Amino acid sequence: MLVDDNADMRDYVARLLSKHWHVKAANNGAAALAAIGEQPPDLVLTDVMMPEMDGFQLLSALRTNPQTKGIPIILLSARAGEEAAIEGLQAGADDYLIKPFSARELVTRVHSHLQMSHLRSELSSNRMKDEFLATVTHELHTPLVSILGWTRLLRSNQLDRATALRALDTIERSAKNQAKLIENLLDISTIISGKVCLNRQPVKLIPIIEKVINIIKPNAKAKGIDIVVETRGSASVQGNISVLGDSNRLQQIVTNLLENAIKFTHSGERVEVRLNTVDSWATISVKDTGIGISADFLPHVFERFTQAEVPSRHLPGGLGLGLAIARQLVELHGGTIEAASEGEGRGATFTVKLPLSQIPDFYEKSGI
């Protein structure tokens, strides 16, 4: 992105740079900012003195926007001297080029900053890959250590019956955790590649929710957490709420939300599951009284491989895939999922909206 209000200078610089890169030009900072908002460039080369929005104002606007703060910015100015260059660099520019400059110097500076930008991107990408591999290795290794350790103790034939039963329970639980991690990795890979096939048919939601709760209840009970189901209307009305979807995948969505709620809720507290209808949508809400979600993390809660800190080192970490998978599956069903929290320590609510396959007579007659 080249920004200069002087048409002759703008044309001259554009011709120089167009031999090596694709150049988009603007005659002032405001026009450049609008164009950058539509398509962020790899680098911004801008004059300082311009009407409407000068180079420093453009620089400030780009640096305060999270989407553009990493773009390399080179300032062009007729103001010579060390102080002018220092002012530009302190304002957040990556470089400061004083007019008049040679064509070779301009091309070299632009090339150098583009190379450094690409290198930073590669390093960031590699670091993320390394961090992900380290997390996967740790999460798969942890249950394996537990399985091997208890297996060796069982082989020693020196455990009493109660301890042996505890060992078997621990081995089974660790194996299930490991299997779940592998399942999540395979799931997210399938979803990303677009290979998920839904077996769509009318599915009643009450049996789905009840089945998930029956499976999860032992874990919740062991942690001292009470799961409360709240439904609206009579049992017959609630039993008729159905959506067009894949029964197994819908069960997976509810499971991931409940497991997440239990994981981040303290012992002795509660998790509420609510089923409702709003217009032509079925809504499933999972509300907990747990550690809550900070305002900074809330926008990222459904992203892959991201996860809030667990409240205790004794709790499992995880890969941060459960909510990401839930979001992808909800969207495949034509629905939406939202997270809400009043902040850390104040619990969280996750709400899934799915299009109804049919609206129960009760709601049609009541106009609800």
Image: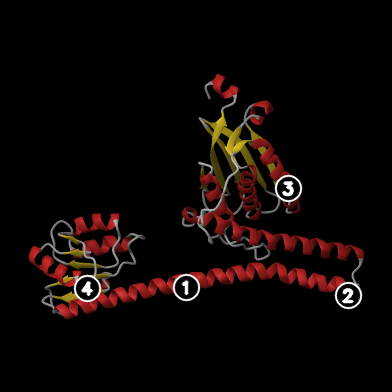
Residue 49, placed above or below residue 206: below
Picture disc at residue 215: 3
Query: Would you say the residues marked 2 and 4 are in contact, meaning their CB atoms lie under 8 Å apart?
Result: no
Q: Which residue is mark 4?
A: 87
Mark nearer the N terminus (2 vs 4): 4
Query: Label 4 crowding class (10 Å Cα cut-off): few <14, some 14-19, many 20+?
Result: few
**Disc 1/disc 4 C-alpha distance (Å):** 34 Å
**Disc 3/disc 2 C-alpha distance (Å):** 33 Å
Q: Position of residue 266 (x, y in %)?
A: 66, 54
- Identify which amino acid the numbered label 2 is placed on: Ser
In the visual, does 335 lie left or right of 120?
A: right
- Identify which amino acid the numbered label 1 is placed on: Asn
Mark nearer the N terminus (1 vs 3): 1
Q: Nearer the viewer, mark 1 or mark 3?
A: 1
Query: Would you say the residues marked 1 and 3 are in contact, meaning their CB atoms lie under 8 Å apart?
Result: no
- Identify which amino acid the numbered label 4 is placed on: Glu
Q: Position of residue 264 (x, y in %)?
A: 62, 55
Q: Nearer the viewer, mark 3 or mark 4?
A: 3
Q: Quadrant of residue 50?
A: bottom left
Q: Position of residue 294 (x, y in %)?
A: 51, 55
Picture disc at residue 126: 1
Q: Which residue is mark 2?
A: 156
